[in-house]
Image (cartoon, rainbow, N blue to C red):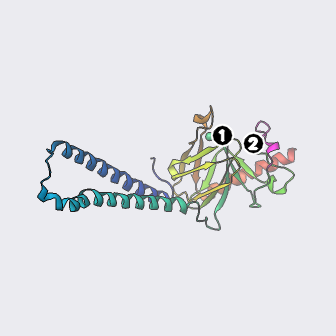
């Protein structure tokens, strides 16, 4: 994994390190057991030793089995808790709202603009060649100020709530540097939230084999200072207004 740049990433990294270490220890122990079993000569149990058999089974089989089961249950619960913290537990009320749309073979990021509300979209209006890849409905006043970008620009240290949609098939949004992974499914509106911390450029990938162009379905996340983010959004808004004036 690349260096972590998000608030939630440290806990994920700690759990992954623990899980991998536990797997390594269990792997080595299993092979040690196998080697011992192969080298020790089999002996016929004496009638006198039969009464010890149950305590031996408990010690050699049941106890390790219960311990490993408890470890696996703990690992599952710990992972589910991290997963749920970014999905089932809602974002902070002031979280930045960004919509992510996956379409063969491109990611689009939509910002609601000054009115803080995403405008209406209609599938019939989707036309990437005409500059409307998401099918924004210009008759809706909320849609007029929506900024659509192919780069995900985010301010550092502010929580972002991503709303994921897909226009055709299932796509998988993966930002390794933020330890964020979430599918975008046609017909579903899914949420995932996180807080980027370290400014920088982070690759965004698609993790679902979504067609012939799947491998090039990549984008970038730019984490910048809040001032740089505001300047970027304002310049995009200005570009929208100029376009409107020309039309
Ligand atoms: Cu894809």
Magenta stretch: includes residue 127: yes
The residue sitting at the top extreme is: 212
Q: Are circles 1 and 2 on residues that touch, CB within 8 Å?
A: yes
Query: In the picture shown, does residue 71 fall above or below 246?
Result: below
Query: In the picture shown, does residue 121 fall above or below 75?
Result: above
Ligand 1 - quadrant of the structure image: top right
Q: CA distance from mark 1 to mark 2?
A: 10 Å
Decide which of tag 1 and tag 2 comes sooner along the chain. Answer: 1
Judging by the rendered image, the residue that carries numbered circle 2 is 133
Helix, strand or loop at mark 2: loop
Is residue 114 something one can see in this rendering? yes
Helix, strand or loop at mark 1: strand
Q: Which residues are magenta?
A: 121-131
In the rendering, at what x and y percent does residue 44 appear? 14, 48
Q: Which mark is residue 106?
A: 1
In the rendering, at what x and y percent does residue 76 appear? 45, 58
Circle 2 Cα neighbour tier, 10 Å, few/some/many (<14 / 14–19 / ≥20): some
């Amino acid at each position: 994994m690349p260096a972590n740049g998000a608030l939630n990433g440290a806990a994920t990294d700690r759990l992954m390190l623990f899980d991998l270490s536990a797997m390594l220890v269990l792997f080595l122990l299993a092979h040690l057991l196998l080697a011992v079993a192969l080298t020790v000569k089999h002996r016929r149990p004496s009638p006198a030793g039969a009464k010890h058999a149950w305590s031996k089974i408990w010690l050699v089989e049941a106890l390790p089995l219960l311990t490993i089961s408890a470890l696996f249950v703990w690992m599952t619960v710990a992972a589910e808790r991290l997963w749920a913290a970014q999905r089932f537990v809602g974002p902070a009320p002031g979280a930045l709202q960004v919509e992510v749309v996956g379409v063969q073979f491109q990611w689009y990021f939509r910002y609601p603009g000054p009115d803080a509300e995403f405008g209406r979209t209609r599938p019939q209006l989707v036309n990437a060649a005409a500059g409307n890849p998401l099918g924004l409905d210009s008759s809706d006043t909320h849609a007029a100020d929506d900024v659509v970008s192919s780069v995900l620009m985010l301010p550092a240290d502010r929580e972002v709530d991503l709303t994921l949609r897909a226009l055709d098939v299932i796509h998988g949004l993966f930002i390794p540097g933020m330890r964020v992974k979430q599918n975008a499914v046609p017909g579903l509106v899914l949420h995932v939230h996180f807080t980027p911390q370290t400014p920088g450029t982070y690759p965004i990938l698609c993790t679902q084999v979504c067609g012939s162009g799947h491998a090039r379905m990549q984008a970038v996340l730019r984490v910048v200072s809040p001032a740089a983010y505001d300047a970027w959004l304002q310049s995009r808004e200005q570009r929208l207004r100029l376009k409107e004036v020309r039309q």
